[in-house]
Amino acid sequence: MVRGSPVAQFAGADGRAPGWQAPRVTADTGAGPEVLWRPTPESIAASGLGRFAARVAQRRGLDFGSPPDYDAVWRWSVEHLDQFWADVAASTDVFPGVADDRVLTRREMPGAQWFPDVGAVDDAAVVEHYVALARARRAAQ
């Protein structure tokens, strides 16, 4: 609470303004908050991440679980950076067909080199691509 603020005069002994009923934050995370909702295995599999993980698993012979485990996908994405970004580029049709070894050819920072064989990316062309894709999907419904 900031001294002299309009709310400061109404603060209780604990320094919180009236109406703020949440307990103080502590380092004790043992109990954790009550889980109000969990996605079903079917909704996880049907999500964007679920569909991406299924394509990657089939293409690369990997197993992320069923439904796919977010932590397993994340771990793979950071441990296999080239594979992950090649699959993202292919699945979004932005840079289809880029080989894993042509994704990140220079890892030094600064100066990392991403997708060197692709050339300059025209932002307008990428937007137009996604607009056309959305129109095609809408027309197919």
Image: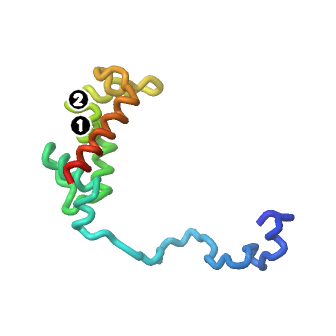
| Residue situated in front as seen by the camera: 13 or 55 | 55
Q: Earlier in the sequence, mark 1 or mark 2?
A: 1
Which type of secondary structure does the marked residue at label 2 adopt? Answer: loop
Which type of secondary structure does the marked residue at label 1 adopt? Answer: helix
At horizontal 28% and vertical 53% (from top left) the residue drawn is: 48
Amino acid type at mark 2 = Val
Q: Judge whether 58 appears above or below 120 on screen.
A: below
Q: How is the image coloured?
A: rainbow
Q: Judge whether 127 appears above or below 105 on screen.
A: below
User: Is there a contact, CB below 8 Å, between mark 1 and mark 2?
Assistant: yes
| Horizontal and vertical percent position of residue 83 | 25, 38
Query: In which quadrant will I find the C terminus?
Result: bottom left
Answer yes or no: is residue 61 visible: yes
How many neighbours does mark 2 have within 10 angstroms: few (below 14), some (14-19), or many (20 or more)?
A: some
| Horizontal and vertical percent position of residue 126 | 35, 33
| Residue situated in front as seen by the camera: 49 or 74 | 49
At horizontal 23% and vertical 37% (from top left) the residue drawn is: 90
Amino acid type at mark 1 = Ala
Pointer 1 residue: 90
| Horizontal and vertical percent position of residue 78 | 34, 43
| Residue situated in front as seen by the camera: 137 or 117 | 137
| Horizontal and vertical percent position of residue 39 | 31, 69
Answer yes or no: is residue 81 visible: no
Q: Which mark is residue 98?
A: 2
